[in-house]
Amino acid sequence: MSERPDHRRRPPELGPDPGGAGGDLRRRDAGVHRAGSGRGGRRATSGARTVGAARRRGRLVSDWLTTPLEYAFFTRALLAGTVVGAMSGALSTFVVLRRMSYIGHGLAHSVLGGVAVGLAFGVDLYVGAIVATVASALLIDAVARQRGLHADAAIGIVTTSIFAIGIAVLAVVPTRLNVEAVLFGNLLGVDRTDLWVAVGVGALFAVVLFLLYKPLVFATFDAEVARVHGVRASGIELLFSLVTAVVVVASVRVLGVLLIAAAVVIPGATARLVTRSIGAMLAVSTGLGVAAAVVGLYLSFYLDVPSGPSIVLTGASVFAVVALGSAAAARRALGVARRFSPPSGPAGPEGTGAGDGGDDGQVPVGARHH
């Protein structure tokens, strides 16, 4: 290797030649940095981007959940809706098992009559509603005891009449009633009174369900056997109707008159598809009622739709998914059973083979006498 020309020689006081060992080290370090900026660097950058995107999505979800809670009206509605969802979900278990979905529909209609008459006379909304629904429950029980009449006929007669009274009163007497809010529920209309009514009714409902759970289950599955064992099935029927009436009244603000019936049917019907015991059905139905209420209220807030339809459509969507999944699972199970079932033997000619009970062609014992 030739030496540098004199005019390019490095003075000794400046240290090692960059082209020597020091330069090699710097070039090696530069090579490491360049390698780091290659595939590994791209991986690190991509990972950073993924983490950043995940954090942004997490913040969006967090904001989506917490922003409505900054408003007092939504917090009240959410608390009341949770209680109402739990009550309607638990009640739905017995409504479905007892095949009494029509009672929720009927009592909900009677609420409007009570509300209209109460407002016409200057009475509080809840007072008119509770009087109308309790009176409806008692009248339904009395009419259903008549010879030749069933509960569905009694419900149709009593509740439709009270509903018609409410419509007539609204047409004749001027009131400040927001009919749309009563029919479909109103997220903005839930005040402290509505919240405390829901909490109080929820506590009462929990106590009644705890004390009467076994007699109610007994009467639900076999009323005759329940009577033999000393359970007053008629009293259980009446008490069940009264409890349903009170739950319906407590749900008016959140769900609305026309959609309460769906809220006391859909959770139980959905739970029935995926459970095998009444305890599991009660737990799943209650959870579904709460989930539908919470999700429905959030959708009501962001989509600016009435809370009642939003909650009911949420529950109906869950039911549709579960029903389709159950049907698909049943078809798969049937296909597996057919695949592994033993094949049946081919039918032989008349008088011979397996078709006639033996290889010798003789008729099986006992068949000659037929």
Image (cartoon, rainbow, N blue to C red):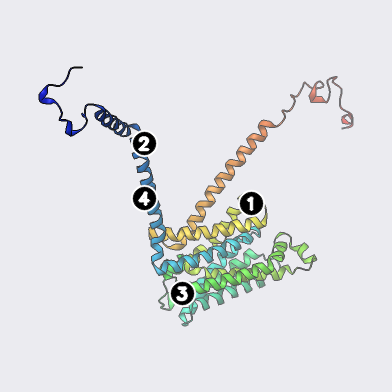
Report the side of 321 relative to 146 (left or right).
left
Observer-nearest residue: 117 or 321?
321
State which tag comes first along the sequence, 2 or 3. 2
| Label 3 crowd (10 A; few <14 / some 14-19 / many >=20) | few
> From mark 1 to mark 4, how far is it between C-alphas?
39 Å
> From mark 2 to mark 3, how far is it between C-alphas?
55 Å
> From mark 2 to mark 4, how far is it between C-alphas?
20 Å
Q: Residue at x 63, y 68 (%)?
A: 154
Report the side of 90 relative to 307 (left or right).
right
State which tag comes first along the sequence, 2 or 1. 2
Q: Circles 2 and 4: CB distance less than 8 Å?
A: no
Q: Nearer the viewer, mark 1 or mark 4?
A: 4
Judged from this view, the residue extending furthest toward the top is: 1
Report the side of 183 relative to 348 (left or right).
left
State which tag comes first along the sequence, 2 or 4. 2
Residue that badge 2 annotates: 43
Q: Quadrant of the C terminus?
A: top right
Residue that badge 3 annotates: 192
Report the side of 27 relative to 215 (left or right).
left
The local secondary structure at tag 4 comes to helix
Residue type at mark 1: give it.
Thr
Rendering coords of residue 177 (x, y %): 42, 74
Rendering coords of residue 221 (x, y %): 71, 59
Residue that badge 4 annotates: 56
Residue type at mark 4: give it.
Arg
The local secondary structure at tag 1 comes to loop
Residue type at mark 3: give it.
Arg
Q: Nearer the viewer, mark 4 or mark 3?
A: 4
The local secondary structure at tag 3 comes to helix
Rendering coords of residue 145 (x, y %): 69, 70
